[in-house]
Structures are given as C-alpha cells and as structure tokens.
Amino acid sequence: MMKTIALPAQFDWAQLFDALNIGTILVDSRGCVLHWNAWITKYSNVSSDQALGKPLADAFSEPLPKPFIAAINRAISTKLPVVLSNALHKFPLPLYQLNGSSERISQSIIISPIKNEQAELICLIQVTDSSTSIKREQMLRDHSETHRKDASTDPLTGLYNRRFFDAQYTTQMTQARRQKTTLSLIMLDIDYFKNYNDFYGHPAGDSAIIAVANCIRSKLQRSSDLAARYGGEEFIVMLPNSTEAVAKTIAENIRRAVSELQIRHQNSMVASHLTISLGVSSCLAGTQIDTATFIKNTDLALYAAKQKGRNQVQYLPL
C-alpha cells in the first residue's frame, strides 16, 4: 500500500510555487490577484507586492488581450479548465525575454478553476515558456523542408531533378487526358558541351550548366510550368495547358537568352559562343498517347534540331 506523507501544518506554499520553473498566478472570482510567483516577476518585472490585491488587468503595465480575460471568465463559469495554445495565442501576457530586448516570450497557458478553503471558485493560471519548443519545431520543419528539396531538386542548378519530373509528368499527362487540354514538352541540351568541358574544364562546364538553367527559369512565367535537369547538360521543360505555338515561342526565348549570354565557346562548330538546341512536342487535347512515346517524340525533335545545324528550335508533331 502506498504511504501518504503529510506536509507540515505551516508548509509554505508560496515558497513551493516560487521554486517552480513555470509561472503561477491565482485570481479570485472577481479577477483580483491572490498569488504571483517569482517566475512571473522574473519575466514581467512586476513584483508580487505590486500585483497582489489588484485586478489582474491592472497588475501588468500593458492591457491584457480580451480573449485572455474571456478565458478566465469561461473557466469560472463552466468550472472547466481552459487551454490557450501558443498556436493561436502566442503572447497573451506581457512577459519578455531576459536579454533586455522587447521580444516577448511565447507562452502556453492553462487556466484551471479550483475551490479555496471557503469553497469559493478561484483560478490557477499556469504559464509555460514555449519559446524553446517552438524553435525546435521550426528547426524540425526546416530540416524536413531541406530534405524534401534535396529529394526533388538538382543540387547544381536548383531546378527539379529527373525523378521529380518523372513523377510530375505522369500526373500532368493523366490530368491533360481527363481535362482534354494540351500538354507541351521542350527538351534541350548545350551544343558541343563535351568540347566545352574538355577545353575550359569542369568548373567552367558547371558554370555553363547553371547559366543555361537560369535562362530557362527566367523564361517560365507560370507556376504550373516545370523545368528539370534531365541529365548532364540536358534539360526538359513541361508546359501544362500550352499549345504548340506557345511552346515554340518559349523555346525560342530560351534559345535566344542563352545565345545573348555570349559565353565564349572556342571549340563549338556552330558559333563562337555557347548555344543550345531545342526540340518541342505537344500532346494535343484528347490525344490518347502513352507517356513514353511523348518523351521519345520530343527527344526526336531535339535530334532534328541537331541534325539541321544546332542552335535552333525544331517542332515534331505526334
């Protein structure tokens, strides 16, 4: 059987509350302060002598939010605890960081109705500093977001990677069939990139790939458009609900943007500067074609651009 240890008759409850690493305030049914522990004093810079006997709203140097006062009244009227989560009520009380700044601490608050020795309802307000847990949760969210981005993006260019593209491509094809809209693809790569890499070196090659990626990104204006590094110096762009004419225009804009960079390419057989070749294909509304055939057709369009002299856009109908 568990033994019960009796506390001394003159036990100092105030000393016990002051030892806690949370804030505790007791208010009576009229909202006047009966107890104010050292933790509250520490973060509010208001001593218990200044607060005791005053209405809680007057104890602090700043007005208290109406939802907080309403929560106290609700706890007393319903005789049920009220929890103020930091998700909706981050800073109910004017409690501040100890570094001398004006930054409030995030708070989690529980308001509990209890009966005193005279069987009168009073409220115990427990305040916890939730700043650390909020920062930890934010760190975990940031860490999770970083992992998500790492799994879907190409580390060199910041564009999406091929794995992510493949997943989105399947989804967009299904949606285009269901909604009977046109889906267009642009496939492109850097002309004579091996010659460029061999002559200027891999760091310069990486810089060239990044520059082309930035040109692609700058010419896509809709959030639904998706660009990915497809492999090596090859890229692919998916344009949902875009016609052949729109896709060819965007492809030409990308080609021109890369050419205007005037990145020297001494060993190119096309120009004295870096250029790209692009293939365009469109899956017309209502066309029942499999995903592999559509990709292959776009690749053939790119091949046609190379065969016809490079540094150009070629469209190949399905």
Image: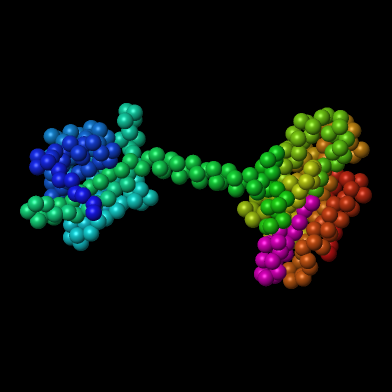
Of 149 and 236, nearer the camera is 149
Highlighted magenta segment, given as a residue range: 169-187
Residue 260, given in percent of the width and then of the height, sits at: 77, 37
Say left or right for 75 vs 155: left
Instruction: Assess whether residue 171 is covered by the magenta stretch.
Output: yes
Q: Residue at x 74, y 46 (%)?
A: 229
* Quadrant position of the C terminus in the picture: bottom right
Residue 191 location in percent, x, y?
Answer: 85, 41
Asked if residue 164 is positioned above or below residue 96 in the image, the reply reads: below
Residue at coordinates 83% horizontally, 34% vertically from top-left?
Answer: 197
Write down the quadrant of residue 280 in the picture.
bottom right
- In the image, is residue 237 above or below residue 292? above
Residue 269: give x, y in percent of width and height. Answer: 92, 38
Q: Is residue 23 visible?
A: yes
Pick the residue in front: 215 or 67. 67
- The colour scheme is rainbow
Where, by quadrant of the figure, is residue 211 drawn? top right
Q: Is residue 189 magenta?
A: no
**In the image: residue 213, left or right of residue 277:** left
